[in-house]
């Protein structure tokens, strides 16, 4: 059942059209995925249809059991709600790929992986999540996506505003909201909704925006989005940003056949008109009358220790396709690689922010040697040929992903890179009488 006050408020907002929306909210949600450039082609047993506003987006006619697909665990695609892929259009129209972008409310990482893909090797993404329990799933999804161009942080909007003044070219605030657009997918969103929740969300959104605002460069771009329909959390907040914080609302080009509804400001996705769940996006440019006063970065010591064994360096570099693109930092026994182009900035972040990961785990000193970390196996810049590869069947792959014992025959001794349909899943070590499963325990498939 839809909440009565919600029905009433949509009737006020949309007039007669509200009946079409209310009916659409009682139908089944749509399943969609966005492909990773890790993989050239992906085949599903059901029919697929293209998401028109994102070149890598596809609708699936049925919802497969993604957990049973090893390619899902290898980060070959992200199960992402189709409407939210519209962020891509804003990036293409306003953001240079060599930008430094903050995704402030990032977990579980749907939009972060999209932005990371858009920026590629040119730009840098900071994917932040303030809720502790959610930051690890964000970090997992970022690692699985495999670009290595993302720093994952766990900070408050206020900390960004205070510590990163005028630093970001673009900030995405995909705000926590009352979730009306998720009513088809999420029973809890319906049961928790009330007019008071809408008011509370709208206030919290303004406080998040106010707190982070200083971190955006003058002239920088704010992408403001929600998955809710009401004007309190959408248009009214955007008008408040424009007037109180100081910004101009920018238009987006789109194809009329996509069924997007223009609000008084910004763009709505209503499920009775667009194929996807409810979504709202508005693009704003921060006024540039303020003088640019970026933080001064002093990066004497970013908490890194010198490599105790310089002979490991060429070994680790041999694991990468483009070793010269990466800087390497040591923390205790662990070596992390991160984009050389942004070395100074990332070193500075690591002293000023609570960084969960800065790039990707490259190597770990073990005994008298250096072993690759799991996240290297997910990296697109991995040089696969650096390791003996073993192709797994689907059953073997699922068993590996459940961290079960492996029974591989005729495989070389030592470290092995396990693949499924040519895509790396992770490492194992053949010690002769058995193979040690090195898949991260915290990522293992628990229920099938
Ligand atoms: N952008 C994500 C994606 O595409 O996968 C979805 C983000 S979800 C709509 C909003 C996020 O904001 C949640 O992860 C939530 O934990 C976080 N959040 C909640 N309260 C917050 C606050 N006060 N400041 C910043 N983020 C907050």
Image (tube, rainbow, N blue to C red):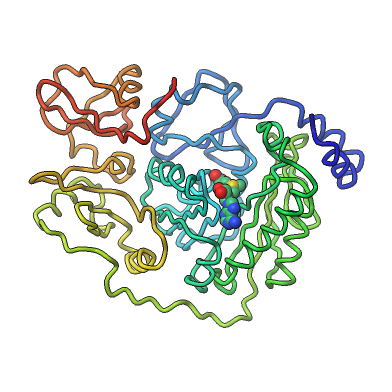
At a point 70% along the width and 46% down the height, the residue shown is 178
| Nearer-the-camera pick, 196 or 367 | 196
Q: Is residue 155 left or right of residue 225?
A: left
Quadrant housing residue 53: top right
Looking at the rendered image, the quarter that the C terminus falls into is top left
Residue 35 showing in the rendered view: yes
Is residue 376 or residue 380 the one in the foreground?
Answer: 376
**Percent x, y of residue 165:** 51, 73
Residue drawn at x 24%, y 57% is: 331
201 relative to 353 in the view: left or right: right
Identify the image quadrant of residue 389. Answer: top left
Q: Residue furthest bottom?
A: 291
Can residue 88 be seen by looking at this rendering?
A: no
Rendering quarter of residue 382: top left
Instruction: Please name the residue shown 70% across and 25% down the image.
Output: 28
Q: Is residue 377 above or below residue 175?
A: above
- Give the number of marks: 0
């Amino acid at each position: 059942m839809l909440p009565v006050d919600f029905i009433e408020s949509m009737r006020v907002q949309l007039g007669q059209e509200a009946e079409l929306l209310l009916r659409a909210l009682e139908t089944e949600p749509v399943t969609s995925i966005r492909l990773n450039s890790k993989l050239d082609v992906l085949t599903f047993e059901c029919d697929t249809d293209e998401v028109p506003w994102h070149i890598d987006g596809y609708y699936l006619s049925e919802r497969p059991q993604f957990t049973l697909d090893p390619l899902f665990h290898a980060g070959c695609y992200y199960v992402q709600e189709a409407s939210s892929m519209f962020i891509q259009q804003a990036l293409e129209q306003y953001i240079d790929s060599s930008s430094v972008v903050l995704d402030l409310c990032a977990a579980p990482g749907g939009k972060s992986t999209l932005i990371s893909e858009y920026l590629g090797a040119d730009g840098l993404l900071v994917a932040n999540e303030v809720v502790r329990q959610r930051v690890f799933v964000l970090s997992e999804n970022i690692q699985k996506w495999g670009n290595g161009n993302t720093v994952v942080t766990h900070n408050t909007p206020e900390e960004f505003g205070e510590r990163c003044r005028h630093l970001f070219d673009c900030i995405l605030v995909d705000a926590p909201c009352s979730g009306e657009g998720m009513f088809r997918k999420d029973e809890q969103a319906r049961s928790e909704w009330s007019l008071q929740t809408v008011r509370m969300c709208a206030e919290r959104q303004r406080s998040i925006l106010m707190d982070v605002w200083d971190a955006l460069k003058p002239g920088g771009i704010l992408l403001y989005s929600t998955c809710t329909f009401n004007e309190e959390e959408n248009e009214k907040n955007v008008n408040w940003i424009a007037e109180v914080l100081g910004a101009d609302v920018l238009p987006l080009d789109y194809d009329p056949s996509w069924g997007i509804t223009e609000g008084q400001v910004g763009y709505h996705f209503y499920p009775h008109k667009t194929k996807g769940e409810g979504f709202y996006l508005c693009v704003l440019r921060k006024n540039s009358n303020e003088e640019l006063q970026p933080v001064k970065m002093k990066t004497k010591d970013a908490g890194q220790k010198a490599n105790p064994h310089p002979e490991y360096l060429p070994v680790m570099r041999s694991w990468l396709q483009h070793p010269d693109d990466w800087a390497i930092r040591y923390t205790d026994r662990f070596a992390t690689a991160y984009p050389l182009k942004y070395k100074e900035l990332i070193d500075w972040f690591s002293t000023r922010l609570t960084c969960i990961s800065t790039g990707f785990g490259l190597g770990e000193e073990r005994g008298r040697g250096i072993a690759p970390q799991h996240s290297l196996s997910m990296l697109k810049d991995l040089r696969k040929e650096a390791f003996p590869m073993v192709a797994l069947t689907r059953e073997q792959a699922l068993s590996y992903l459940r961290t079960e014992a492996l029974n591989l025959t005729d495989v070389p001794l030592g470290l092995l890179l396990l693949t499924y349909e040519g895509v790396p899943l992770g490492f194992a070590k053949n010690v002769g009488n058995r193979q040690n499963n090195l898949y991260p325990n915290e990522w293992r498939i628990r229920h099938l």
